[in-house]
């Protein structure tokens, strides 16, 4: 079963988006960061998507507080 999509409090560099995606898809955070950096070389809204996910994904702390 896959874990939920939350930004972890440990193991994140900037916003924790790549670490959250790595946990969700079962890969390392380093691999996800390399994929993100390489994808930024291609045309598209990758940086804006990162910012949107940073804003929309709950952090691990707030997700734990909200779950009863």
Image (tube, rainbow, N blue to C red):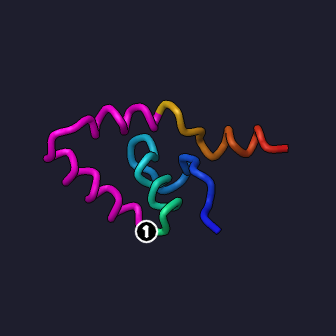
Question: What residue is shown with label 1?
Answer: 27
Query: Which residue is more in the foreground, 31 or 1?
Result: 1
**Stretch in magenta:** 27-54
* Mark 1 secondary-structure assignment: loop
Residue 29 located left or right of residue 41: right
Residue under the point 62% across and 54% down:
4
Q: Spot the residue most to the front.
A: 44
- Establish if 28 lies above or below 15: below
Residue under the point 59% across and 41% down:
59
Q: Main secondary structure of the magenta part?
A: helix
Q: Spot the residue most to the right.
A: 68
Residue 19 located left or right of residue 49: right
Residue 37 in the image, given as x and y percentages of width and height: 23, 51
Decide whether residue 39 is among the magenta residues. Answer: yes
Report crowding for label 1: few under 14, some 14 to 19, many 20 or more residues within 10 A (C-alpha): few
Residue under the point 42% across and 32% down:
52
Which image quadrant: the C terminus? top right
Residue 3 in the image, given as x and y percentages of width and height: 62, 60
Residue 67 in the image, given as x and y percentages of width and height: 79, 44
């Amino acid at each position: 079963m896959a874990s939920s999509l939350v930004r972890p409090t440990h193991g994140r560099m900037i916003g924790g988006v790549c670490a959250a995606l790595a946990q969700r898809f079962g890969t390392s955070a380093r691999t996800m960061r390399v994929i993100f950096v390489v994808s930024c070389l291609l045309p598209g809204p990758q940086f804006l998507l990162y910012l949107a996910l940073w804003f929309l994904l709950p952090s691990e702390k707030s997700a734990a507080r909200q779950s009863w």
